[in-house]
Amino acid sequence: MSVLPSYPLRALHLVAIWAYAVSQPVFALLQGNPEFLVVRGATRVEVAVFAVLLTFVPPLVALACEWLMARVSTRGADLLHLAFLGAFLVPLGMLILRKFGVDSAAIVLVSAALAAAVVAAYVRWRGVRLLFTFSVSLAFVGLLMFVARAPLVTDDVDGAEVTVPEQVPVVFLLLDEFPATSLMTSDGVIDAVRFPNFARFASDASWYPNATTVHESTTAAVPALLTGRLPRGHGLPTLGDHPENLFTLLGESYRFRVAESITHLCPKRYCPRERAQFAPRLRGLFADVQVAFLHQILPTSLKSGLPSLDDRWGGFSKELILAAGGSDELFRVARAHPLSPPDEFGRFLDGISRREPASTLHFLHVLLPHSPWQFFPSGRSYGASPVPVGLAPGLFWSDESWLVRQAYQRHLLQVGYTDRLLGELLAKLERSGIYDEALVVVVADQGVHFIAGEKSRSVSRDSIADIAPVPLLIKYPGQRAGRVDSRAVRTIDVLPTIADVLGVRLPWSVDGRSLLDTWKGPSTVSVAKIDGTLVEASFDEMEDGRRATLRRKAVFGRTWDSLLQLGLPPALRGLNVEASTRAAPGSEVRFDNEALFATVATASPFVPARVTGTLEGIRVSPEQLLVVAVNGRVVAATHGFRIQGKQRFSALLPETAFKDGFNRVELLAVEGSPSAPRLTRLGENRPGFDALRSPTEETPSG
């Protein structure tokens, strides 16, 4: 006869332990990061179903397994019950140890030992079992409180009752994570070689090279831009917290074509949102919560391969598919994720037509050139990395300056792709006959910096010169000649400017000012952090920071070829390595995703140009120059780095380096002088290899 409780009591105990270990910590995680649910537009029903499934399904599945085992062996069912209790307790132990700052893989063993001790006490003492019985109330109360308090979007408010005398087409392109210096040459002008469409647009528009954002985070920077108000408190990017915005201003007078990527500021009456089916949305929520929860309980050494949470609020598992060369379409089928930025941009362009009335707002917030970086300027993808190259745990850039430069390299390539899309937008506006008469606004929410050892998207005195300045270009109706306006303007000035152009009197107070007015602007730059504190800098400090960034950027040269040849000595560019290269005895290179090199299709939108892997059997110092050769020709340079005791490497190759079918990829060490280098082959891919490796993290852990 079993000494353990009846099955109803077992169910209560499993639910209680699961609540302590998983469901309640997940609820606390979501309540502490309200943007997670808001950005994905979760409904009350969706949240309630998610909470019920998370709270009860795993314990009830465990109980069902016990009941089935009891049909065979009562003792086996008892042991299985204790095993489930112990398994449920392990994440609780890990969570507690992580809260105390323990960051070692040993926490798994310690948590397992603690779980075993609690299970032993459960078997021996009735009081422990009673505690578990009464603790089940936590699961029910926590579930009800979470569902009741979960932050959700407000769907609708009334539009402003205003008159719009000047009804002209408004085209608003909002870009993301885009420092103004990325567009500039060392002389501080727009780089017409790499970014011809931005330069072309600037020749017709007003460029504000000293424009700055007012917040470091998208969820506050975008509402500030669309309301004309400085961020206050900890408001969410929702209509409920920002009812007075661009969309409610024009909603009663304009026809809307609006695509918001992160915010929910446009009322449903003007902007009906397409929603994926309920079940795929729910699966996507569970998948993203799983990644976020694992980040919370796992020590740094066990997070290898987990997608970075970064400053995003969903779609984390998407990167695992893209890293393996999969497509966005595959991910949407798997998780019902919204359209990818390229697809979203294509849909936006398709909707622009000369048949639209003049009083039309075309608004698109596209997550470009935001990471994950995966596009060449041509639009071809080389696949997203699960962890952005160069990014160490805690969202800090690595101390390895080479890896940070690689991240900067990939960012600039994605800026090139963004430039390509801007060119398509300008061409579509011209074909549609609305370009000349339209008010066209191109702006970004905030920047990003590439400073080794600094937190990647957090503003500080060291990073404000990269986080604050953003591209701002406005072509006013009828404007045909470009001009440069060097005033210290801010993104909160955009909405008052739109209202001024349309002749609208704003029915609410704003902090920004119309750019059509004559005024000097603030004397300092001020950017708010997520915690509400302000980081300020004088314009002399901002100018010094901009010059420092442009000096760092100078290592990439002036062309795309020079950018992709980062660190590659001229004597090695295109060098034939077939004849004179010796092999390093005992060394072996294990390429990630090696199978992709064997099945290249040069006409495909994907090219396996992101080459990463592990070097074994030989020790290579971080200063050692390494090169990658494809089909016998040197095409890229890199350096090694160490992570979790392994020697890793990462390089981005030109998309033109490959041919159809099998491609031979080699990693070589460079010795001797730059003018007379000697190469040693460390390893190469294997013909016929067809096992797709799992992608691994590209970044040192510290």
Image (cartoon, helix red, strand yellow):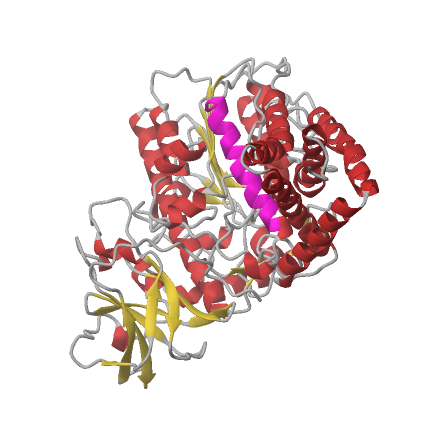
Quarter of the rendering occupied by the C terminus: bottom right
Up-down relation of residue 361 to residue 196 (above or below): above
Q: Which residue is drawn at 72% across and 36% down?
A: 13
Residue 495 point in image, percent of width and height: 59, 31
293 drawn magenta: yes
- Residue that appears at 58% across and 34% down: 70
Tell whether 300 sits left or right of 126.
left
Coordinates of residue 92 in the picture (x, y in percent):
69, 48
| Residue 570 sits inside the magenta stretch | no
Give the camera-side residue of 695 and 120: 120
Residue 469 horizontal/vertical position (percent): 56, 50
Q: Can residue 235 be seen in this view?
A: no
* Farthest right residue in view: 127
Q: Is the magenta stretch mostly helix, strand or loop?
A: helix
**Left or right of 529, for residue 475:** left
Question: Relative to residue 397, is residue 616 depicted above or below?
Answer: below
